[in-house]
Image (spheres, rainbow, N blue to C red):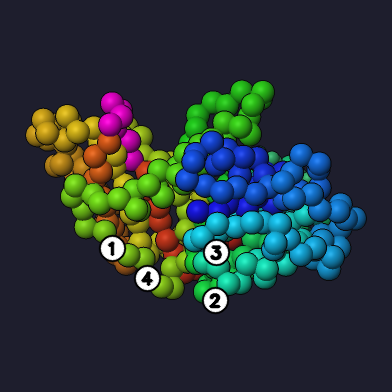
Amino acid sequence: MNIIGLGKAGCNIAKAFSKFPQYHTVQIDVGKDSDITIKGRKSHEDYDTHFPSVKKRLKLTEGSVQVVLCGAGKISGGSLQLLAQLHDREVSVVYIQPDLQLLSEIQKIQEKIVRNVLQEYARSGKLQMLYLVDNLLLEKGVGEVPILGYFEVLNQAVVNTLHMLNIFQNSEPVIGNYIAPSALSRIATIGVVDLEKEEEKWFFQLTHAREMVYYYGINEEELKTDGSLFRRITDFLKSKLEEGINISYGIFKTSYEQKYCYCIKYTSVVQSSLEEK
Ligand SMILES: Nc1nc2c(ncn2[C@@H]2O[C@H](COP(=O)(O)OP(=O)(O)OP(=O)(O)O)[C@@H](O)[C@H]2O)c(=O)[nH]1
Ligand SMILES: [Mg+2]
């Protein structure tokens, strides 16, 4: 899979993906240490008007493309131009929503424009999927995060979650009832389940979910010996049942000692930020 980071948050997340051999990553930003350095512009609109052709320089490998970006910054004005250059690929976007309260008025407007346009793109099928991630909920999911290395910790959490979901989605479960999301459900978020507390930590407060999928990674020994595990899992899933939501799951064999669970939920409904709700 190809991962393209645009702007600072996007590039940092692409960099975290590059630690796994499965991904070809490209960082696009104004700095010299990016893989593709583009000319800095004065405004969000200027990035849209003057976004350069990067297609050849991306050197994409076969397969799908995931673009990672945050909408607050000026460079995100170039996101639609970048997506236009990827029209012949299956493209998904990971959208990072920053702490909105700490943005300037201009940044707030930019963020809202990018978030809403991407959601319209997803709804119209131009994007295969749009994953929404709110930095504040990501922080809550991770627990206490020190100032030094703050974004590294957040980025690692989102990258590990996306990576494990990619692995599970390409493996055969030991047992499961996977229900594919409807072709209309192209806005999604991801999260982790604290299995001790049986508590979900979603990385975006997504409303009107239509499908939820839980991916369990369980150690082989435990799969063989724990007689009550399956009941505990199915009881948890049943506690999540609500009218209008399809819940499905997969249980996968892993070699890790610790068991874990990642989750994903999908909707077709455009989402507003927590501040707008
Ligand atoms: N999750 C995450 N968020 C980040 C990271 N770096 C920055 N952010 C958030 O993303 C927002 C936008 O980042 P900026 O550095 O301001 O913007 P940019 O995307 O480089 O755009 P420019 O304005 O063109 O520089 C910031 O307000 C941060 O809240 C990161 O590494 N991870
Ligand atoms: Mg920047």
Residue hosting label 4:
182
Residue type highlighted by circle 4: Ser
Q: Which callout, 1 or 2, points at the residue further toward the start of the chain?
A: 2
Disc 4 and disc 1: Cα gap in Å?
A: 9 Å
Depicted 186 relative to depicted 69: above or below = below
Disc 4 and disc 2: Cα gap in Å?
A: 13 Å
SS at badge 2: loop
Q: Residues within 10 Å of mark 1 (few under 14, many from 20)?
A: few
Residue hosting label 2:
124
For residue 67: magenta? no
Depicted 89 relative to depicted 157: above or below = below
**For the point 64% across and 56% down, which residue is it?**
59
Disc 4 and disc 3: Cα gap in Å?
A: 17 Å
- Residue 101 occupies quadrant: top right
Label annotation for residue 91: 3
Residue hosting label 1:
179
Depicted 177 relative to depicted 226: above or below = below
SS at badge 1: loop
**For the point 21% across and 43% down, which residue is it?**
233
Q: Nearer the viewer, residue 186 or 90?
A: 90
Q: Are marks 4 and 3 in contact (CB under 8 Å)?
A: no
**For the point 50% across and 29% down, which residue is it?**
143
Depicted 20 relative to depicted 83: above or below = above
In this rendering, does residue 202 appear at all?
no
SS at badge 3: strand
Q: Are marks 4 and 2 in contact (CB under 8 Å)?
A: no
The part of the chain drawn in magenta is 255-261
SS at badge 4: loop
**For the point 49% across and 61% down, which residue is it?**
63
Q: Give the position of the C terminus as an image quadrant.
A: bottom right
